[in-house]
Amino acid sequence: MTGLSTHVLDAVTGRPAQGVRVMLLDDTGSQVAGGATDSDGRIADLTGTVLASGPYRLVFDTGTWFADNGIEGFYPEVIISFHADGGGHLHVPLLLSPYAYSTYRGS
C-alpha cells in the first residue's frame, strides 16, 4: 500500500458497503482520483502513490448507495476533509448509517 485507502462499513448491518463511489479532491476542488468500494467495502489504493502534503477531501456518494440498497438516508454525500503530511500510507474509513456517520484516521 502506498497512498490512500478507505473502507465503508454499513453500521446498521455490520457488513461492508459495496459499490459506494468515492472521489478524492485536492484543495482546488479538482478530482485527483476516484473509484468504488469492492465486495469488502474497501478501496485498497485510491491514488497509487503517496499524496503530496496538503488538504484533501474524500467525497462519498452515499445517496446513490442508499437508493441502490432501498434505504432512505439523510445524507446524499459524506465529505471528509483531511490533511496529508506527505508521508506514507493513509487510511480513512467511514462508518455509515442512514442518519449518522463516523470516521477516524485508520492505520
Image (cartoon, rainbow, N blue to C red):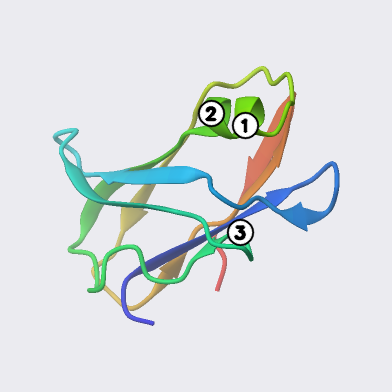
* Residue type highlighted by circle 2: Thr
Which residue has dot 3 on it? 41
Q: Residue at x 74, y 25 (%)?
A: 71
Q: Closer to the N terminus: mark 3 or mark 2?
A: 3
Which residue has dot 1 on it? 68
* Residue type highlighted by circle 1: Asp
| Label 2 residue SS | helix
| Label 1 residue SS | helix
* Residue type highlighted by circle 3: Gly
Which residue has dot 2 on it? 64
Which of discs 1 and 3 lies nearer the camera? The answer is 1
Quick one: 1 or 53, which is closer to the camera?
1
Give the vertical position of 71 relative to 69 (above or below): above
Give the vertical position of 89 relative to 58 (above or below): below
- Contact, mark 2 vs mark 1 (Cβ under 8 Å): yes
Image location (x, y in percent) of residue 62: 56, 32
Image location (x, y in percent) of residue 25: 25, 42
Which of discs 2 and 1 lies nearer the camera? The answer is 1
Which of the 4 image quarters holds residue 29? top left
Q: Is residue 76 left or right of residue 99?
A: left
Image location (x, y in percent) of residue 57: 34, 41
Q: Is residue 106 left or right of residue 101?
A: left
Marks 1/3: CA–CA distance? 15 Å
* Farthest-out residue, bottom: 1
Marks 2/1: CA–CA distance? 6 Å
Q: Residue at x 83, y 54 (%)?
A: 14
